[in-house]
Amino acid sequence: MSGKKRKEQQAEQSAEQEERQQGQMEQETVLEREPGKSGVEQELPDQNDNDLAAEKDGLTEEEPGQEEETAEAEWMQEKEELLDRLKRKQAEMDNLRRISKMEQAEAKDYALHDFLSRLLPVVDNLERALESARSDQKVPDTHVDGLEMIYKQIFQILEQEGVSVIEAEGNPFDPHCHHAVMAVESDETEPGNVVEELQRGYRHRERVLRPAMVKVCRE
């Protein structure tokens, strides 16, 4: 009986050793894999990782194209803004040139305005002298002719410089070119019209050189 027990004990010990060895092999296999996951579960993350990497690659490939489109849109917008600013500056320069030309032309046209206004009293005195010589029989005709010639020459020069006489007597009163010194009763003209011109007025081109001094018919 003792021999059989020994054999049985040896068989049991051999079986236990085999079970231990098999358990160790299984444990080593599990350790080679990720903790707490089966072989199938370990393969799935690899596939997911591959899919995520592919998506990232796709996004990485699309981002340069989007950046180029954005940069081009910004460049076009900046170009339009610069062109608009350039057009505005050109328009401003054109306006400045036009205004400058107008001012230069006006300055040229009216350069003698002050001089002509100072010359008018001389013309007035010459007219008075000519009227007095015509009415005085003692004054020789040659003197009267000489005064008339001087007066005509001066007036021709004034006309060449753009000076003209302001019409007053019999015309409606215009405060821009007439200077009323009194209002009188008159049946010869309508109310508001100039009855008499006391001093001749002149216009230099489009500007009033001196308003006419007049009497106005009372309304």
Image (spheres, rainbow, N blue to C red):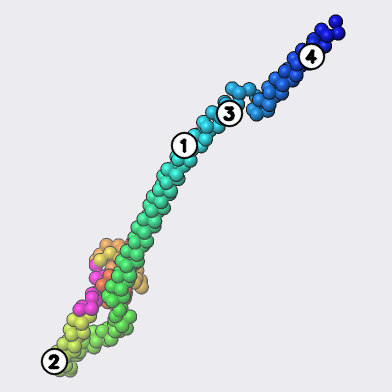
Q: How far is disc 1 from disc 4 in space, using C-alphas? A: 66 Å
Viewer-side residue, 202 vs 10 = 10
Q: In the drawing, does residue 12 fall left or right of residue 109?
A: right
Question: Mark 3 highlights which residue?
Answer: 45
State the quadrant of the C terminus: bottom left
Q: Which residues are magenta?
A: 159-170
Q: Nearer the viewer, mark 3 or mark 4?
A: 4
Please determine whether, in this image, residue 70 is positioned above or below residue 128: above
Give residue 58's mark: 1
Residue in view at x 32 percent, y 64 percent: 94
Residue in view at x 23 percent, y 78 percent: 161
Q: Residue 38: x, y in percent?
A: 63, 22
Q: Nearer the viewer, mark 1 or mark 2?
A: 1
Q: In the drawing, does residue 89 fall left or right of residue 105?
A: right
Residue in view at x 41 percent, y 51 percent: 75
Q: How far is disc 2 from disc 4 in space, using C-alphas? A: 179 Å
Q: Residues within 10 Å of mark 3 (few under 14, many from 20)?
A: few
Viewer-side residue, 1 vs 102 = 1
Q: Residue 24: x, y in percent?
A: 71, 23
Q: Nearer the viewer, mark 2 or mark 3?
A: 3
What's under tag 1, amino acid-wise? Gly
Q: Are marks 2 and 4 in contact (CB under 8 Å)?
A: no
Q: How far is disc 2 from disc 3 in space, using C-alphas? A: 133 Å
What's under tag 4, amino acid-wise? Gln
What's under tag 3, amino acid-wise? Pro
Please determine whether, in this image, residue 38 is positioned above or below residue 192: above
SS class, disc 3: helix
